[in-house]
Amino acid sequence: MDILRRIDRDAERWLLLTFYVMLVITMAIEVLRREIFAYSSIWGEEIVRYSFIYLAWIGAAAAVKERAHIRIDVLMHYLPPRAKALLYIFGDLVMFTVAVIALYWSLETVHVSAKFGSVTDGLRVSKVWFLMAVPAGFILMVWRLLQSFLRDFRALRDGTPVFEGDKLFD
């Protein structure tokens, strides 16, 4: 059970680290190859591009988890805890609806790619592996939004302050 808690707590962090390291190392190698040997590869550019796409979608899910998305919360400072919790629940419901719709359409794109067997230009690998970044990000977002609902409902029920995430500026 402890391992599941650790995965739940750190999954996005480790995935982001993995893709970021892969992106930086591949980009550094490609820059050196281009500048020193006057040669670069298509596969390196593709690895960097697709690593960046995974970074973006996993990062979006991590932002949902930490309530770190950009928002205007001037009015939130003046609301009582129950109203604040209700407003966060409403926002999460809207985001949940958008995430489920986007998940459906992103899976449709993956299905079409798999059906026609499209491959990447340089790596000649099925594009399904790279197109899965979008539905994987939305699946993580849906999971984190469900956790957020539970956390906010508990705060609403108990009358405790709702989780607002870390502040960038105060």
Image: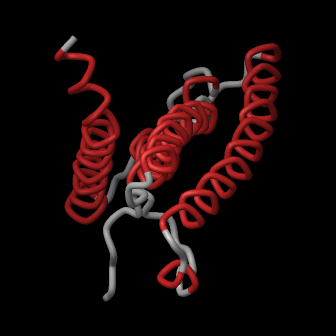
127 vs 38, nearest the viewer: 127
63 vs 6, left or right, is: right
Q: Is residue 46 visible?
A: no
118 vs 42, left or right, is: right
Q: Please tell me whether residue 119 is drawn above or below residue 10 in the rendered image.
A: above
Residue 46 percent across, percent down from the top left: 49, 43
Q: Please tell me whether residue 21 is drawn above or below residue 124 in the rendered image.
A: below
Residue drawn where x is 50% and y is 36% of the image: 150
Q: Please tell me whether residue 166 is drawn above or below residue 143 in the rendered image.
A: below
Residue 33 percent across, percent down from the top left: 25, 54
Count of marks placed on residues = 0
Residue 96 percent across, percent down from the top left: 68, 43
Image quadrant holding the C terminus, namely bottom left
Residue 114 percent across, percent down from the top left: 74, 16
Residue drawn where x is 47% and y is 82% of the image: 77
Q: Please tell me whether residue 114 is drawn above or below residue 24 in the rendered image.
A: above
151 vs 31, nearest the viewer: 151
26 vs 99, nearest the viewer: 99
Q: Can residue 117 be seen in this view?
A: yes
Residue drawn where x is 75% and y is 47% of the image: 98
109 vs 82, left or right, is: right
Q: How is the image coloured?
A: secondary structure
Image quadrant holding the N terminus, namely top left
34 vs 110, nearest the viewer: 110
Residue drawn where x is 31% and y is 33% of the image: 11
